């Protein structure tokens, strides 16, 4: 049995079609079809059947696919383990992160990581957790870093967390302006439409009963710019606004209160972290 034929079949099944598999493998569709046909001749039965314009696995195809998951799962684990085996921290590291983490947090982490391990090549994909989960499940990303996560798919797990302090901020010259303090700039309701409770907004309403969400965006950099435009108040992480607080550009609405949220590290339940990923986590925790 040709392992390459098996791999092409596995990708077609996993991506639910020859067109998607062609994009992932970067190989023309007719070539993939030929490989799958050769595998079918080898095993002696059809692996796919047509349903309209779609293809689905036959019962025999399902059995072969289940074996493939074990085979290529082992291959993925081997890839992740090679750094540990060689003792060298090097090569590409694929990770996903929410916008504020990618834009304002990871640069300093990479500086620490690359100072210690200059042969590491970080690749960061930015977006909300719900958009990047599938890439982590497929093994295209080794891990993800997010603050807010909707319900996790069963294939994923939160394996580490880091506590980060947040501040409810307003433009300093608008600190006493009631209509600005009543205008809350939200984000969680976009990342997860099922969210019904907003603890920071609830705290704000104790002093400003008419406070409500006036603008929503899941881009915290945009939140900061909107605060500077005088459009309202926003809850933002230390690493995004600490410089502006120190320089007096922004004012902390509740400086004595300790708003904290967990940065979550997510991976596949069956995934074994590479040495580069483990070193990245160490740099984050430091």
Image: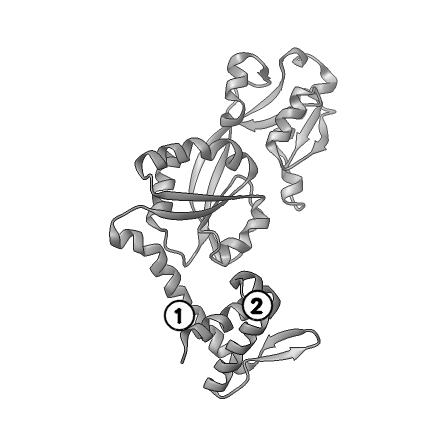
- The residue positioned 37% from the left and 51% from the top of the image is 273
Q: Nearer the viewer, residue 118 or 267?
A: 118
Q: Residue furthest bottom?
A: 44
- The residue positioned 47% from the left and 57% from the top of the image is 139
State the image quarter where residue 189 is shown: top right
State the SS at label 2: loop
State the SS at label 1: helix
Q: Quadrant of the C terminus?
A: top left
- What residue did someone put label 1 on? 71
The label nearer to you, 2 versus 1, is 2
- The residue positioned 53% from the left and 26% from the top of the image is 240
Give me the C-alpha separation between circle 2 and circle 1. 24 Å
* Residue 191 badge: none
Which x, y percent locates residue 164?
47, 31
- What residue did someone put label 2 on? 28
Which x, y percent locates residue 49?
61, 80
């Amino acid at each position: 049995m040709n392992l390459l034929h098996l791999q092409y079949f596995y990708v077609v099944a996993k991506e639910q079609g020859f067109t998607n598999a062609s994009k992932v493998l970067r190989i023309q569709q007719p070539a993939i079809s030929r490989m799958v046909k050769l595998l079918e001749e080898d095993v002696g039965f059809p692996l796919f059947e047509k349903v309209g314009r779609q293809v689905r696995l036959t019962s025999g195809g399902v059995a072969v696919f289940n074996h493939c998951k074990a085979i290529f799962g082992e291959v993925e684990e081997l890839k992740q383990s090679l750094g540990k085996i060689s003792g060298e921290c090097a090569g590409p590291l694929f990770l996903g992160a929410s916008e504020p983490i990618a834009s304002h947090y990871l640069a300093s982490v990479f500086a620490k990581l690359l100072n210690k391990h200059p042969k590491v090549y970080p690749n960061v994909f930015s977006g909300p957790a719900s958009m990047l989960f599938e890439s982590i499940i497929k093994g295209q990303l080794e891990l993800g870093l997010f603050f807010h996560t909707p319900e996790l798919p069963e294939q994923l797990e939160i394996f580490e967390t880091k506590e980060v302090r947040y501040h409810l901020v307003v433009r300093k010259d608008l600190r006493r302006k009631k209509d600005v303090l009543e205008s809350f700039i939200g984000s969680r309701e976009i990342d997860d439409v099922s969210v019904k409770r907003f603890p920071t907004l609830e705290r704000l309403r104790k002093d400003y009963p008419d406070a409500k969400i006036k603008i929503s965006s899941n881009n915290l950099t945009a939140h900061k710019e909107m605060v500077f435009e005088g459009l309202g108040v926003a809850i933002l992480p230390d690493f995004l606004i600490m410089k502006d607080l120190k320089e007096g550009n922004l004012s902390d609405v509740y400086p004595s209160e300790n708003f904290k949220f967990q940065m979550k590290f997510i991976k596949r339940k069956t995934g074994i972290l590479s040495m580069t990923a483990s070193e990245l986590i160490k740099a984050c925790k430091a």
